[in-house]
Amino acid sequence: MTLLAPIALFTYNRPEHTRRTVEALAKNELAAESDLIIFSDGPKDAAGAVKVKAVRDYLRTVSGFKSVVINEKEKNRGLANSIIDGVTEIVNKYGRIIVLEDDMVTSPYFLRYMNDALELYKDEEQVISIHGYMYPVKEQMPETFFLRGADCWGWATWKRGWDLFEPDGKKLQAELKAKNLLYEFDMNGGYPFSDMLDGQIKGRNDSWAIRWYAIAFLKNKLTLYPGCSLLQNIGNDQSGTHCSSETVQPEICARKLKVEKIPLTICYDASRMISLHLREISGGNEGIIKRLKNLLWK
């Protein structure tokens, strides 16, 4: 039997979101065979310590997995540092990883899809990651497909993929500009990811995800997406970091996806549909700017 990837769950100060995330994950068909490693970030101040304690009290009751390990940080490290260090630690030890944050409710087939795809594409250097979220586009999508870059809502990778991560946003931005790739990087004008990268460089946000996407894009790597979403992000209630109440969520896929080898090429039809979707829900250029501001730390 294929060794299942450990699941890294990153939590902070939202006990109800965390509970819903864990309960859905525990209903996955491979949960009982999977190791769950939880990273609990420390509070920023005394007031925040109450909610962090509530999260940790709940985490100590979690069961239903092969093993549960909780890493509690005394001080607040922030989401980016927590994920970068946590993912690095786990892939160095296990070689592969499935990553969730504390606001992601998954399908019962999420772990199956992730593990099947991790095993299927483990030796394909061009494939950098597996993604579980799919945008709620109106058109029918392929069962699975590839896009250039990487994503951050329920994802998985191997050590060989994460070893490419580049923390220096300024370096990434310079290369995108030098190669004249900013428009394509922005999903052909569908969403201002380049502005988000600029915000990370200037300290307006601390997004690890924009740097993960940028390095994967620059290296011309591919991420496998599902044709229907295997999770919902329930954090778009302005309770967390880099979230917006305007984000439209898809229905969770109620079936098991067929994961099989497909050509290692970008699905341009899917890319076009996602770009149009992002522009539509953003209300055009003015809406995109508004949504971007919601994603940035002020």
Image (cartoon, grey):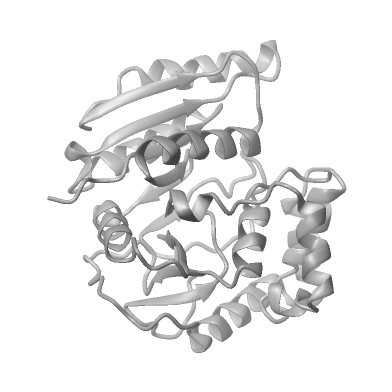
| Residue 57, quarter of the rendered image | top left
Q: As displayed, is residue 274 above or below residue 154?
A: below
Residue 111 drawn at (x, y percent): 28, 51
66 left or right of 130? left
Residue 78 drawn at (x, y percent): 66, 31
Q: Looking at the image, which residue sits at the far right?
A: 202
Q: Looking at the image, which residue sits at the far top?
A: 46
211 left or right of 68? right
12 left or right of 166? left
In this view, the residue in front, 227 or 156, is 156
Q: As displayed, is residue 217 above or below residue 41?
A: below
Residue drawn 19% across the image and 46% down it: 30
Q: As displayed, is residue 260 above or below residue 113?
A: below
Instruction: Count the labels in the image.
Output: 0
Q: Looking at the image, which residue sits at the far bottom?
A: 269
In this view, the residue in front, 209 or 264, is 264
Residue drawn 54% across the image and 19% down it: 52
Q: Where does the C terminus fall, quadrant-wise? A: top right
| Residue 264, quarter of the rendered image | bottom left
282 left or right of 140? right
Residue drawn 30% across the image and 42% down it: 25
Residue 251 drawn at (x, y percent): 39, 64
Residue 217 drawn at (x, y percent): 62, 68
In this view, the residue in front, 18 or 256, is 256
Q: As displayed, is residue 141 above or below residue 26?
A: below
Residue drawn 46% across the image and 83% down it: 265
